[in-house]
Image (spheres, helix red, strand yellow):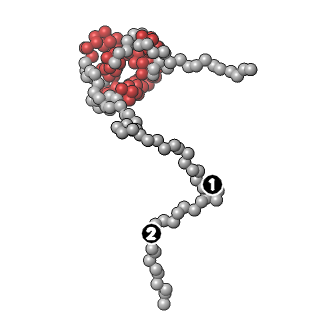
Amino acid sequence: MYPSKQQPIYGAPPPPAPNAYYGAPPPSTGLPVTVPPGFNLQAHLPTIGPWSTGLCDCGDDGRNCCITCLCPCITFGQIAEIIDKGSTSCGASGALYVLILCVTGCSCLYSCFYRSKLRAQYGLREDPCNDCLVHCCCEYCSLCQMYRELTRRGFDMDIGWHANMERQGHMATMPPPPQSMSR
């Protein structure tokens, strides 16, 4: 009574038809490159390693420990200037830290952001736990650890980013002067 349904036959999909709107895809324009044996084209990802000091090793640098306990905005400003590679000054970062502390009481949320940036720049482990948790529970110890890490990586925290670059023989990164078109 009813016609029988035929089972569909699945095979290779048909070749794509050229789209009337876009036309045929453009030909590839790359040049073939031969890679010498042993040459690796993969992107180099930083290895994840340990911090140079522990979270509770604040006594390793007694001067910084005292400054951080009395006025953490100074230590934070020094850290932020180095991590931001001089794009923000120590004073501006420290002032923002104090402002956030006075308004919200949660400056640890701001400083944990810089701990994450430091870890990303130098391939450090998220140790002993999550960055925000470290800063919320042990703010001063974490700031001291970050300070020590940068010091052990060769930065003189008292002179700032630009002076460190001059001392290391690099030119400080400055924006190019404004240019205009002229005849």
Reading the image, the residue beneath label 1 is 22
Say whether residue 181 is left or right of residue 53: right
Please tell me which residue lies in front, 147 or 11: 11
Residue ranking furthest to the bottom = 1
Give residue 102's position: percent from left, percent from top.
44, 20
Q: Residue flagged by tag 2: what amino acid is it? A: Gly
Residue ranking furthest to the right = 183
Please tell me which residue lies in front, 138 or 172: 172
Give residue 148's position: percent from left, percent from top.
32, 17
Residue at 41 percent of width and 40 percent of height:
35
Q: Secondary structure at mark 2?
A: loop
Badge 1: few (under 14), some or many (20 or more) residues near its Cα, within 10 Å? few
Residue 120 in which image quadrant: top left
The Cα–Cα distance between marks 2 and 1, rounded to whole angstroms, is: 27 Å
* Mark drawn on residue 39: none
Vertical arrangement, residue 63 with respect to residue 23, above or below: above
Query: Residue 136, can we see it?
Result: no
Asked if labels 1 and 2 touch by Cβ distance under 8 angstroms, the answer is no
Query: Residue 44, can we see it?
Result: yes
Reading the image, the residue beneath label 2 is 11
Q: Upstream in the sequence, badge 2 or badge 1? A: 2
Vertical arrangement, residue 59 with respect to residue 134, above or below: above
Q: Secondary structure at mark 1?
A: loop
Residue at 39 percent of width and 27 percent of height:
121
Q: Residue flagged by tag 1: what amino acid is it? A: Tyr
Say whether residue 122 is left or right of residue 182: left
Give residue 169's position: percent from left, percent from top.
43, 13
